[in-house]
Image: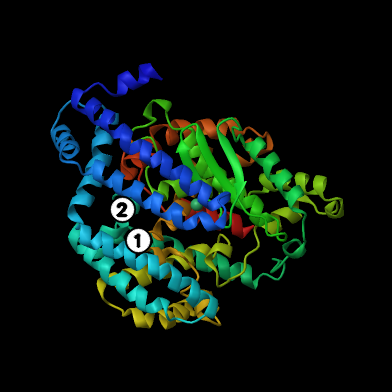
Amino acid sequence: MDNSFKRYFSDPTVLEILNKYKQIWSLGYAMSLIEWDMETYMPPEGIAERGTANSQLAVLQHKLLLSPDFQELVEKAKGKEGLSDQEKGVIRVLGREVERARKLPERLIAELREVTTKAHEAWVISREKKEAEPFLSYLDKIVALEREMADKLGYEEHPYDALMDYFEEGFTTKKADEMFTAILPTLKKSLEKVMNDETFPRCHYLETFRYEISKAERINRKILETVGFPKSRARLDVSAHPFTINIGLKDVRITTRYEGFDIRRTILSTVHEFGHALYELQIDEALSGTPIGTGVSMGVHESQSRFWENVLGRSRAFSAIIGELLRGEFPELKDYSDGEIYRYVNLVRPSLIRVDADELTYNFHIALRFEIEKRLIAGEVKVSDVPELWNNMMESMLGVRPRNFAEGFLQDIHWSQGSIGYFPSYSLGTVLAAQIGAKMESDMGKLGEIIERRDFGAVREWLREKIHRFGSTYAPRELLKNSLGEDVNPSYFAKYIEEKYSK
Ligand code: MG
């Protein structure tokens, strides 16, 4: 590790930056551990004290980042020539953070923090009551603040670009529009075909099959072992909403949840989080403790989870792995063939809830949110029109209409947190996952055969070599061009969908 560190980092200014950055990194390390604990094992009443401690750590971190001497060092390093790619990466990442912090006034950050804290409570109440208020009034404030934020951050073409760039560096409204234009017609066509095909099942007995949690947990652990989850550097725990968190490059944690029925949900969500975890676990160790020692963007991160969940996890060959484990744990399922499991994990059914959506309908859920967010930020629709607009769009896109707002615009937590501009990363990740799958196949042969051989080591190594090891060294668009030979290209996803659902 020391050798590569010296190879990557030798410029005295960058070394000074990295030395100072250790404190910022350490605070982030503590905050990650705190967050993980909050979502998993903390006794519920600890929340108030934990909230105070956590926000004070965030304040400290912000102060260090914006301290004049730190900013000066970053500024000084910016103009340097002859830096290594890693050094340039450090300056790019920190430059973005410092610039963002500089452009956004304290007052705006504080207002947004205050509004989103209250908005979260209001969202919980609204969702329970299935009524637009009190949340809608907070959404109005959030949209106004986010619009102000976009103006402060600056943009070339669309104010939404400024918000999206935070989650997905270099991705624009125009590119997102192009992506959806390229994939939605294919999805629509495949969806119609499947819906008109009588032989394609609408629902499955296994959706209602009730399982013992201990057995599902054993299946998840065996699957993780099969795909190569390193026990000495990673954990699997339980939380209300599954997530992945990297404490450090040798301490990455994932969670899942056990609902007691529809066992594919816990299995596929575990495989999904494994994809996120593997990305962090395979980052070059020499980048540990630096600003580039983490995944580069939400979209690229999601491409890793979707690749494992969809491209591999929902494939025929992987269904055989799941099938074998299911039949092993549940003698009552012994008559379910691998083909039956394949149909079960690939059921297609237009539905109202994004997180339950299948491969054919998922991107419509995202396109809807993207359209609404884009128009809100551009001032083309009013927040008060959102609840009905949502329902109308859902009906025209997927032919299903929410019966209440909890099934509509209240379903996701993102807006209550002020995360506007985040959703397109989900579709970007899905599209990239297919692109990665295609590139991997052209390098290594059919993925189905690789899975049949259970050669997940080869898959991990390809991902490590092409994507993971760099961390955030390169900006997403550059990483993709370097490693895949082109930036995001939705035609791979369209082809993947056509091939999979024409059979
Ligand atoms: Mg994810």
Q: Quadrant of residue 265?
A: bottom right
Q: What residue lies at 51% left-to-right and 38% top-to-bottom?
A: 252
Asked whether residue 435 is in view, the answer is no
Q: For the residue carrying disc 2, how many other residues have a C-alpha within 10 Å: few (<14), some (14-19), or many (20+)?
A: some
Which label sits on residue 166? 2
**Of pointers 1 and 2, the one earlier in the residue sequence:** 2
> Callout 2, which amino acid?
Tyr
Taking the image as shown, residue 128 lies to the left or right of residue 19, namely right
Where does residue 191 sit, x and y in percent of width and height?
57, 67
Q: What residue lies at 18% left-to-right and 51% top-to-bottom?
A: 102
Position of residue 162 relative to residue 133, above or below, is above
Which label sits on residue 279? none
Q: Quadrant of residue 1?
A: top left
Taking the image as shown, residue 146 lies to the left or right of residue 339, namely left
Q: How many marks?
A: 2
Q: What residue lies at 52% left-to-right and 74% top-to-bottom?
A: 398
For label 1, the SS is loop
Q: What residue lies at 51% left-to-right and 47% top-to-bottom?
A: 36
Where does residue 119 sit, x and y in percent of width and height?
39, 70
Where does residue 56 sit, x and y in percent of width and height?
34, 49
**Circle 1 is placed at which residue position?**
421
> Callout 1, which amino acid?
Gly
Q: Residue 4 versus residue 304: which sits nearer the camera?
A: 4
Where does residue 375 sit, x and y in percent of width and height?
31, 73
